[in-house]
Image (cartoon, coloured by chain):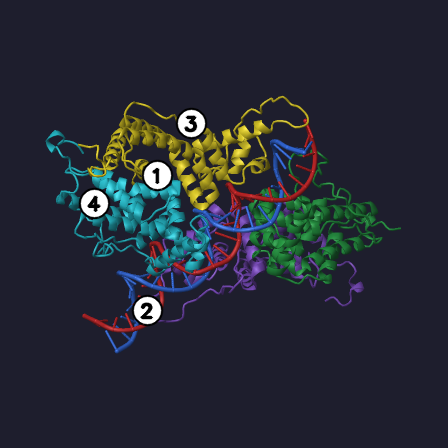
Chain colours: A cyan, B yellow, C green, D purple, E red, F blue
Amino acid sequence: MERRRLVSPPTGQPRTPAPRRPGRPRSEEAHHAILSAAISLIREVGYDALAMDAIAARAGVGKATVYRRWATKETLVAEALERIMRSIPVPDTGTTEGDLRVMMRSSMDMYRDPATKGLLSGLIAAMARSERIAQAVRSGFLAARREALRQVLKRGVARGDLQEGLDFELAMDLLGGPLLFRMFLTGGRIDEQLSRAIVEVVLRGLAPRSDTSSEPWRV
Amino acid sequence: MERRRLVSPPTGQPRTPAPRRPGRPRSEEAHHAILSAAISLIREVGYDALAMDAIAARAGVGKATVYRRWATKETLVAEALERIMRSIPVPDTGTTEGDLRVMMRSSMDMYRDPATKGLLSGLIAAMARSERIAQAVRSGFLAARREALRQVLKRGVARGDLQEGLDFELAMDLLGGPLLFRMFLTGGRIDEQLSRAIVEVVLRGLAPRSDTSSEPWRV
Amino acid sequence: MERRRLVSPPTGQPRTPAPRRPGRPRSEEAHHAILSAAISLIREVGYDALAMDAIAARAGVGKATVYRRWATKETLVAEALERIMRSIPVPDTGTTEGDLRVMMRSSMDMYRDPATKGLLSGLIAAMARSERIAQAVRSGFLAARREALRQVLKRGVARGDLQEGLDFELAMDLLGGPLLFRMFLTGGRIDEQLSRAIVEVVLRGLAPRSDTSSEPWRV
Amino acid sequence: MERRRLVSPPTGQPRTPAPRRPGRPRSEEAHHAILSAAISLIREVGYDALAMDAIAARAGVGKATVYRRWATKETLVAEALERIMRSIPVPDTGTTEGDLRVMMRSSMDMYRDPATKGLLSGLIAAMARSERIAQAVRSGFLAARREALRQVLKRGVARGDLQEGLDFELAMDLLGGPLLFRMFLTGGRIDEQLSRAIVEVVLRGLAPRSDTSSEPWRV
DNA sequence: TCCTAAGCGAGACGGTACGTCCAGTCTTCGT
DNA sequence: ACGAAGACTGGACGTACCGTCTCGCTTAGGA
């Protein structure tokens, strides 16, 4: 059983004791100012019009100071994202359906932020271009959501609402995919009703088999 | 912004010794040359590094000639896409599950084209940027696929494999979303097994209601 | 009878008449605007603080337009110089000494321009760095002065004031060198008295050879 | 490329340590390492491409350690120069012409050092920029040469080879100027023949007057 | 022996300018 | 009347140095 819990690390930063490089240490202040500037600029001008020059200028920082930390705009944005969407609480409403609805609402909230569309679409393009960026995003803000969701699903299995040997990845993609699809391709509405319907289909589609002995190996 | 160097190779494409007529030559020819150039360049350098200069150069065309036809890179690409993914046949395997599997395979084929990732991700960013582009893409290559899928689902309802009053949009997003999700976010595998599992969940989740009163013909 | 004539530069660029390249021709207006901007900026901020960005901005021109014409700041400045110091009239005062004094005065006028020091010293550094730039400067504003001086010296030989078979290069360097030396190394005064003394020494030192009969005043 | 700040010109004063201050004394070793690094780098990359970062790095020294001693690149280089060209012996060949030839050869040797061109041209630009640097150079490596030359000329006057009341400055500039002129402007050859010719012209041009009565004010 | 002050290597800091690239528009000439 | 060629303005890019400013650590003389 994997003991990885990426959800809400209680310690904050991994406090390295004293590897301490020589020279002047990097300014935490500058670091934070850059991230803040990036976030506010994205919200103002959108992701595509986001310029490194502008970020540096608004942060009151030299461009080199930005590039010293993030090689590309995308890795910078990815970290900004991560900072925003750090901890996703694991809901506990008493029922699997309720828990899933809470998770879906959290996702919808994210999608409904006017900044998200430009930001996330730019990030998708960046991830498609660079596996490094993709890794950063996945282990960043994606990991947290998915870990929380995984807990909910696990509890659902324990409750008997979901089949044994459930393919968690599949379940998560079934829950999250339609939102993404609507957001970026069809442009369809993303609302409570949609979320309710998706949860229902998934719960029904992944309910325990009536005849477990005939399909014990199924995933 | 995503940029990559693209000092387009001189690309010694032999100037077509076209029928040199005075007056009004090769409007259609130029049109097609531009689309071809765009497509081949996307496959070579990716969507983001695609430069109008390069397209015009490879097409053997002035930049103005490109802009005369398409105002933006995205509308040009959208038309190119449309040209590629024109007709989607409606499958007829005899069973709803079989038909859906065929549809899924067609989608997977598209996703598996190495060019698709860069192209589609760039397009997603462009759609997020501009509703006009979004419309073009939706009514273009998306519409065809969705229309075919709708036929299959309709037949599924008629067969009694899917519930009456089925929300087609929901069903389509449930089928297509997970692929998109894996493609661009999680990076998970997209294969026959996945497709099979998705179809199964959707069929089960959207099967006719078991409530006898609303389904009196069931025993 | 006015003998003042312009020394038409025999070294001037081969002004290509009309090989006529395709495409939009380069803008004469932009060309001139850039040179003017460069000149005025040099006078304002000095040669070293001269920035290509600033030149382009003041000229109301994109930086690429500047770089399309001049690869470096120095070649641009060299052309600007050439434009300023284009025509050097060949003096004709009736005596060799008088002619040389006029030439010296012209040089001194140049050196006394407050902008010259920074400009010429920067140019010297640039010439030392790049033979291409050196060539440009030599065939540019240097060539004109030297050609005029050569005429004067030639006439001096014809008049019998200077020795037959005179080494023109030597004579010119003897006349011009001390000015440069004071300007940039010793910082000594550059004035009429200096110019008079130099001319005198050179005339005496390069006078016709000391055949006793031709120098009856010698004891 | 020489660049300067528009704001706050640095103080180019060599910062000599006070007689006895508290704290750790400055490292002689570092001092020497910096000068050596500067000299070797000038020879390798030229004066203009000389970067303080590089000097510090090669010397194995922090940049602050460099700036603590020399406020500008030029003062540092000036001191390096001085260290190289320290003492110029006064020649004594028996004749004025011989002595002058020896002095000229020494100058030519300097000019012929491949490093000199870039170094001296850069220094000229720096001197034009700052009178303080100019002073440093003049009282540094220039002063030594000129003092030796002055001795030779003085002896020449005593011998009757040069006129009484000789303007030493003029004579020195006439001897040195042509070399500088060829070095940096015309690019002409600098060789034994040139040196011989210059000496000849100067000796002839500044020979004692044959008719002293016509110059009664001379002493 | 400890304290204080300035030195040390290292390297990050806010900046300026660089030279390149591309977007989208505007001319010129040739067909 | 088009079309190719390419110059145009404008602006972001990522790099290189500048001269200054911390860091943690010597290295001395004076307390």
Q: CA distance from mark 1 to mark 2?
A: 79 Å
Question: Do dots 3 and 2 share one subunit?
Answer: no
Nearest to the eye among marks 1 and 2: give it. Answer: 1
Q: Residue furthest right?
A: C1
Chain ID for label 2?
Answer: D
Q: Which mark is residue A150?
A: 4
Q: What element does badge 3 sit on? A: loop
Type of the residue with mark 2: Gly
Q: What element does badge 4 sit on? A: helix
Query: In the rendered image, which quarter is residue C130 located in?
Result: top right
Q: What element does badge 2 sit on? A: loop
Type of the residue with mark 3: Ser
Name the residue tied to disc 2.
Answer: D23
Nearest to the eye among marks 4 and 1: give it. Answer: 1
Q: Residues within 10 Å of mark 3 (few under 14, many from 20)?
A: few
Q: Residue at x 56, y 24 (%)?
A: B14
> Closer to the camera, A150 or C215?
A150
Chain ID for label 3?
Answer: B
